[in-house]
Image (spheres, rainbow, N blue to C red):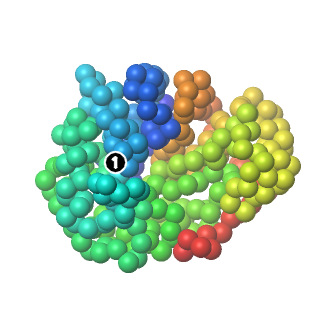
Amino acid sequence: MKRNRLGASELMVGEIGLGCMSLGTDRQQAISMIHAALEHGVNFLDTADLYDDGLNEEIVGSAIQGRNRGEIIIATKVGNRRIPGQEGWVWDASKAYILSAVKESLRRLRTDYIDLYQLHGGTLEDPIDETIEAFEQLKREGVIRYYGISSIRPNVIREYTNRSSIISVMSQYSLLDRRPEEEVLPWLAEHSISMIARGPVAKGILSNRGRRLQENYLDYTGDSLSSLYPKLLDSANVNGRSLSQLAIRYVLSHPAVAVTIPGASSLEQLLENIAVAEAPPLREEEIILLQKLTRSNRYEQHR
């Protein structure tokens, strides 16, 4: 599998990673899928302390035991704080919370360090200097190797780019959500920061099964998706790809995208996603056609 440098770091990530959120809570099945991903060349595993109340981190931690830790890049996230006795969570980007939460993530992941620690959101109202101080301290202490943010907000992304040493931004990006193309991806490319693209198959809409076609998605109505779907399917079939493989290849065609993390809830889905690594990149004319078929969305409410 092709490997790309993540930002200006020393981390070399396989272009297809594994978004672990969708693995579910069946420990043995989830661990088996992580093992299958690793055996097929995946080296980037993304999780978060929030997923399944920490169980997802525990599953990842169990799956990597007995393997060469240096060959696996573990990414997790912080910022969503659960309060005992209360439902849901609150946002907490304080230095004190980050320094405390990382210890629990390390325990669940059963590792001494985290390769990429990501702020799981963020607003301009956060104590940004304090947040950055926490990540920089953890770097100095060797608890984390690098840090980044997970955000779809251009203003927040710009702020952290200008004020910190983030190496990556995780953001939603797909043929149906092309918002990052407007300003985020050019900005990241200019600053040598990589995007980790999540949601490349748009909740399964961009798959041969065409799940959720009758539901609205961003500014697409169910009717418009039903009309668009066969055109995208035809584009995929012309070159012998599945639609999900075409969708993932599209995301990877932007030079600022280092890795995409399609989720998978079954071994079949996982292997189909990983097979994208064997497919050639999209040609320029294919990219242009796909862009004509789909919309260049705008951020509007997320600036």
Is 242 placed above or below 86 here?
above
Picture coordinates of residue 240, whole percent (x, y): 75, 28
Question: Is 70 positioned to the left or the right of 88 in the image?
Answer: left
Residue under label 1, please give it.
49
Question: Is 257 positioned to the left or the right of 206 in the image?
Answer: left
| The C terminus: image quadrant | bottom right
Examine the image and state in which quarter residue 80 appears.
bottom left
Examine the image and state in which quarter residue 241 appears.
top right
Picture coordinates of residue 69, whole percent (x, y): 26, 31
Residue at the far front in the pictured view: 85
Q: Residue at x 59, y 29 (%)?
A: 269
Q: Secondary structure at mark 1?
A: loop
Is 208 placed above or below 187 here?
above
Residue at the far left in the pictured view: 141
Q: Residue at x 46, y 55 (%)?
A: 170
Examine the image and state in which quarter residue 160 appears.
bottom left
Question: Is 5 positioned to the left or the right of 259 in the image?
Answer: left
Q: Residue at x 42, y 62 (%)?
A: 121
Picture coordinates of residue 98, whole percent (x, y): 24, 59
Q: Amino acid at mark 1?
A: Asp
Q: Nearer the viewer, residue 13 or 33?
A: 33
Q: Residue at x 38, y 58 (%)?
A: 89
Question: Is 297 positioned to the left or the right of 29 in the image?
Answer: right
Picture coordinates of residue 3, whole percent (x, y): 44, 38
Q: Nearer the viewer, residue 79 or 139?
A: 79
